[in-house]
Amino acid sequence: MLMKIALIGYGAMGKLIERLAVEKGYEIAAIVDESDAERTPAEIAGKLYGCDVAIDFTTASAVRRNVEACLSSHVPLVEGTTGWNEDLEAISRMVTHANGAMVYGANFSIGVNLFYRIADFAAELFSKFPQYETFIEEQHHSRKLDAPSGTALKLKDIVAEHIKKDFTIAATRAGNIPGTHRVGFDGPADQILLEHTARSREGFAHGALHATEWVVGKQGFFEFTDILNQIIELKPQINTDEHK
């Protein structure tokens, strides 16, 4: 079936998603770009009618408007923008109340989401050895506005489930770094360092398209990491009682 996708945001990520989507045989049926920056949710919704799904990679300040537009036009949304955590609960209520559908994620890279699981397992192990102290480091290109990154904050939430002593995130913004995240455990005699390095943005774009294919026909407010098993057909490990 030909899927009609709306791109909200037409920067580097939007153009990359467009190329990959067309290669998969999908249609880019609408584009919301910088020329639409001052448009209202109702005006944006008018551009989305007839689309099967929308993908948003814009700015944190535009997320609420874009969610409202998608709900008004009954278009499921894949939200790739980060830096809007303070609005998470409010937007969750909006989507649920409107019987809409939205998938959001601190990072849509499959590799990063598997890295979350590795960090979770490692933190559980090191929680039994208090002589090791935990730290997180992240690096991104100088154009990335939010610091620490959403991925680093997600990593901290995951690790803090096991490591109760507070620890820091060090953030670097320089040059054209696509994205590097490290979780470290430093002890008196040695250091264990887990690292994920993005070579390009294609990992994020492929993950967003996986989420796009999955969310069509769904209702609810979903985090990408929680539905990863269903999206890439891994053995289910989700505790449904915890994720209702």
Image (cartoon, rainbow, N blue to C red):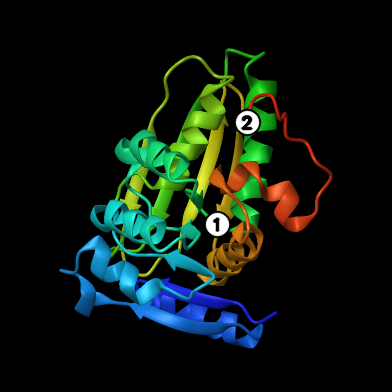
Question: Residue 148: which quarter of the image?
Answer: top left
Residue linked to disc 1: 108
- In front: 43, or 17? 43
Determine the residue positioned at 46% across, 66% down.
55
Front label number (2 vs 1): 2
- In front: 193, or 206? 206
**Marks 2 and 1 close (CB-CB < 8 Å):** no
- Quadrant in the picture for the N terminus: bottom right
Give x and y (percent) for residue 7.
42, 74
Give x and y (percent) for residue 176.
37, 70
Give x and y (percent) for residue 58.
33, 64
Measure the alpha-carbon separation of dots 2 and 1: 19 Å
Residue 13 visible, this orientation:
no
- In front: 14, or 146? 14
- Quadrant in the picture for the C terminus: top right
Q: Can you tell which mark lies on residue 152?
A: none
Give the farthest residue toward the left: 38
At mark 1, the secondary structure is loop
Image side of residue 207 versus residue 239, left or right: left
Residue type, numbered disc 2:
His
Q: Can you tell which mark lies on residue 243?
A: 2
- Vertical placement of 202 versus 20: above or below? above
Determine the residue positioned at 74% across, 47% down.
229
Give the farthest residue toward the right: 235
Residue type, numbered disc 1:
Phe
